[in-house]
Image: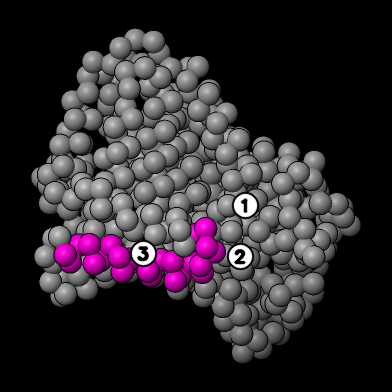
Amino acid sequence: MFRIRAIISPSFLEAVLLTSLIVISMAVCIIKFDAVPHMPILLAILLLIAYGLLKKVPFKQLEEGLIEGSKAGLGAIFIFFFIGILISSWMMGGTIPTLIYLGFQFISPHFFYAVVFLVTCIIGLAVGSSLTTVATAGVAFIGMASAMDISLAITAGAIVSGAFFGDKMSPLSDTTNLASAIVQVDLFEHIRNMGWTTIPAFFISLVGYGILSPSKEIQQLDQLNSFQDGLLQTGMIHWYTLLPLVLLVILAIKKVPAILSLALTSILAITISYIFQRLSIGEVLNILFSGYTSNTGIEAVDSLLSRGGIDSMMFTIGLVILALSMGGLLFTLGIVQSLLIKVEDALKSVGSVITAAAFTAIGVNTLIGEQYLSILLTGESFQAQFKKVGLANKNLARVMEDAGTVVNPLVPWSVCGIFITNVLAVSTIDYLPFAFFCLLSPILTILFGVTGKTLTYTK
């Protein structure tokens, strides 16, 4: 039934108490003490080891549980290395700067909220990071909304929706790669499958923001012009810098494996930068590891473009290893099994399994406030249940993103919620009703699960 065999069978009460203690300690560390999630996860691992030793489980078997758990993330870790390289190569090759510049061309004096949503979607797709999109383009849009005296809450909701659309659908996103790797689904197949819920959520959100948009003319575009001027100063805004993106789309259509696609498009971007920017081999290698550094002198533009590199992935890689290792211990000690057995009899239909997985992802986000854990724990816990009802793993990957990735910014005490509130100066509670895309995604994934629409079954 489970990928990792349980060594012991704790009672349901023991499993609930241990899980509650882990959740509470992690929530306190992250929310009250503003700790990075690595530390409370490490403390939880030590707690589980202590419990296992008290139950006379040999330390060797506990260690094997840690190792087995971490193995599930090796595919994601290798992809993360190539994502870091891809981002830095697309930065120095001009692909991402050009995409961002083109995105700002869509700014119009009418349908402001809809345009904000569209532009942040484009930038989010290009950058692959929701928080980077919020902290850069999002800040500019909030400044424009404040100057025009229009709703900051709706503007923030549009920014968050667009940023997390990109975080969810971009092949550069670590959450997208993590979700596909955990359940062993090809990255681009995962992205295509998410389209069934993402595209309706996108268009409904777009219409909603269009209806809510003010009719007044936008006069103050100084911040936008500053962004565009800064991007032009890089000297990298050219049509040929989009060739790596074209190649990536072609490779995705051809269903080339993710690592090969990322490597080939990175090589093309590196070639463009080498030919047109005359970078030395040593400079290229350093950028691929440490990331690209922009020096336009415009802080917001430099913040947006200075990123990438293998080194930038180490935070995520460390978190993935620790979280999966904790998951391995939870399975080894039979804690997850004990909890799921109680509800197993109720999870007989496709709809109930998808609904349970979605609420698990939402619950982890709500209780712990950590995006990666909601993906990791949901993926590890429900693979057997999806297999039992005949559902392909890509359905689970979609649920993990629909109810995991995009829900985190809606939780005031979550990592994303706290960050966005601090950056945009708009409280989570204020923008939550207007983050249409983030609200619609879990609703649609549960609705399609209950109705059986857009699902893929195993042969």
391, above or below 61, in the image: above
105, above or below 44, in the image: above
Q: Amino acid at mark 3?
A: Thr
Report x, y in % for residue 421.
39, 36
Disc 1 is placed on an element classified as: helix
Q: Amino acid at mark 2?
A: Val
Q: What are the residue bounds of the magenta stretch?
A: 252-275
Quadrant housing the N terminus? bottom right
284 left or right of 376? left
How many other residues sit within 10 Å of disc 2, few (<14), some (14-19) or many (≥20)?
some
From this viewpoint, which residue is outermost toward the top? Answer: 216
Residue drawn at x 31%, y 69% as measured from the top left: 267
Residue drawn at x 56%, y 78% as measured from the top left: 71
Front residue of this view, candidates 250 and 70? 250
Q: Which mark is residue 265?
A: 3
Residue bearing the label numbered 2: 185
Cβ atoms under marks 1 and 2 closer than 8 Å: yes
Report the Cα–Cα distance between label 1 and label 2: 10 Å
Q: Earlier in the sequence, mark 2 or mark 3?
A: 2
Q: Amino acid at mark 1?
A: Asn
Front residue of this view, candidates 449 and 262? 262
Residue bearing the label numbered 1: 193
399 left or right of 159? right
Residue drawn at x 68%, y 55% as measured from the top left: 395
Report the Cα–Cα distance between label 2 and label 3: 21 Å
Report x, y in % for residue 200.
60, 35
Q: Earlier in the sequence, mark 1 or mark 2?
A: 2
Report x, y in % for residue 170.
45, 52
